[in-house]
Amino acid sequence: MNFNLNNEQQLLRDGITKFLASRYDLETSRNAAKTGAGWQPEVWKAFAEELGILGATLPEEFDGMDGGAVELMVITEALGHALVIEPYVDVIVVAGGLLRRAGGPAAAEVLKNIVAGTAVAALAAAEPESGDRWQDAATVATPDGDGWVLNGAKITVLAAPLATHLLVTARVAGDEGVSLFLTEADAAGVELHPYRTIDDRSAADITFTDLRLPADALLGERGGAWPSLAQARDEGAAAICSEAVGCMRKVLADTVEYCKQRQQFGQPIGNFQVLQHRMVDMLMEVEQSAAAVLLAMLNLEAGEQERARAVSACKATVGRAARFVGQQAVQLHGGMGMTEELAIGHYFKRLTAIQYEFGTTDQHLTRYAELTKG
């Protein structure tokens, strides 16, 4: 099988890489995260208008470019390599995928605005009691005439402080399954408690108090949102694994360069064989992760079990690699590896966070074992 990128995919990769190298500065992005709006809106606008990556993997009917999993892999790896904090995966992959599968005029309008860069949607699914078990929603949606009233709470909603719209999981009394609702983020009855995560992302805990929604706020079938949510979770996991590969490639390259320059006992520490062995081990973890990501990406449109098995194998592989590569990079840099001044420290935090998003390494190992039984 040919795993090489075609001409269009190579152009996409080269265009994103060139843009980020010349116009995405790590220090500027971190200042925006800590003291500014939490992101750079002008960069997000450029993603839409200059690069076109906000619609690259979405269907043409939503003003997208109808790209597939390989295009998603190319984009997310490049974003990870530059440590971009703008919420591409949360908005385009997770929320965008849910809106695309839900259908209907309301979802289509929001999705077109997302592609244009004028709207940002975030999924509010995790809850204080159930954690990230999205199917165990305790938020309640009560029929009210032709509409709905939502009450409940969500935690760790990534990109919520930046969002114009929220996708909210809730359960209607009498339904066994979970439903999905669309609301504007600044609607009456929505209270956000924003904060910055350890890896400089914007997130919020949200309380919904008597949030009134129209009938068309229900996306898809009542009580039938879980299959789409499960797919969005797997797509998000595969996307951040691809992002992690980009992070690890950058971390490895910086570590090798540092070991060529750092002098000890009158010679570069990269001359010491034991350190060379450690960097080779890092490279092996990166390449294994890249192969696992490719397998997961190529199975995103497969059957449910096949998709889940490939994604869990990928998430477990990348979770182990992210921990190993990040720790080795910090150790080889010495104490400086954990400082704010060096990029390594920022990449290490992101690689640590990725290990816990869309299911932990142990959770995916357990799921993989269950899916491969007899």
Image (cartoon, rainbow, N blue to C red):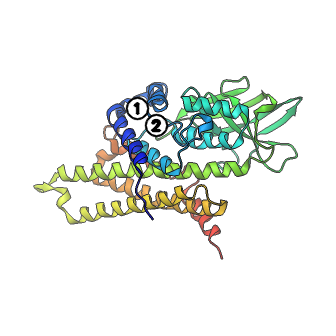
Q: Tell whether 169 sits left or right of 175.
A: left
Q: What element carries label 1?
A: helix
Cα gap from disc 1 to disc 2, whole angstroms: 7 Å
Q: Is residue 137 above or below residue 35?
A: below
The x and y percentages for residue 313 are: 54, 63
Tag on residue 29? Answer: 1
Describe residue 74's horizontal placement relative to residue 299 as left or right.
Answer: left
**Rendered location of residue 289, percent (x, y):** 44, 59
Dot 2 alpha-carbon crowd within 10 angstroms: few under 14, some 14 to 19, many 20 or more: many
* Tag 1: amino acid: Ser
- Identify which residue is drawn at 85% across, 47% down: 175
What SS does tag 2 mark?
loop
Numbered mark located on residue 85 in the image: 2
- Residue nearer the viewer, 82 or 92: 92
The amino acid pointed to by label 2 is Ile
Quadrant of the image occupied by residue 157: top right
Precedes in sequence: disc 1 or disc 2: 1
